[in-house]
Amino acid sequence: MSGNGVLRRYVRRVYLPGQNVQAAEAFAERSAQLAGRFSVFTNNCTTYANSVLREAGLHPPLWVRSPTLLQLWAMTIGERMPNQV
């Protein structure tokens, strides 16, 4: 939150070839049908996001194992967009 109590999002723009976007979308559609059982260590929101990113041609480092670390890594790539409310 900012000082005035407004929640802010930090957005990054990353350019990808169209085929990479299509591969990530296809993976997301396939995996939605095969979601499986949630696991804190092996099948969670961060592991899913990492899988989609890899399909798009982005390869998060091995230390990206939590939502906070994924956000930290994402802040190091791409072009910063204006803060969004």
Image: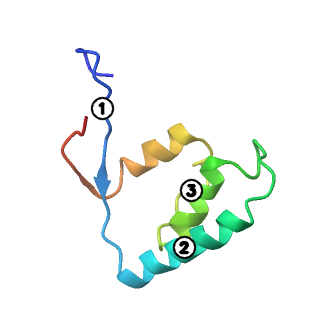
- Circle nearer the N terminus (3, 1): 1
Left or right, residue 57 beside residue 4: right
Q: Residue furthest bottom?
A: 19
Identified at 81% across, 52% down, the residue is 37
Q: Position of residue 59 (x, y in %)?
A: 52, 65
Dot 1, how many residues are within 10 Å of its Cα: few (below 14), some (14-19), or many (20+)? few
The residue tagged with tag 3: helix, strand or loop? helix
Provide the residue designation for mark 3.
49
Q: Amino acid at mark 3?
A: Ala
Q: Position of residue 12 (x, y in %)?
A: 30, 52
Dot 3, how many residues are within 10 Å of its Cα: few (below 14), some (14-19), or many (20+)? some
- Circle nearer the N terminus (2, 3): 3
Dot 2, how many residues are within 10 Å of its Cα: few (below 14), some (14-19), or many (20+)? many
Which one is in front, 62 or 29? 29
Q: Residue furthest front?
A: 33
The correct choice, above or below, for 4 with respect to 23 in the image is: above
* C-alpha separation, residue under disc 2 versus residue under disc 1: 28 Å
The correct choice, above or below, for 82 with respect to 5 in the image is: below
Q: Amino acid at mark 1?
A: Arg
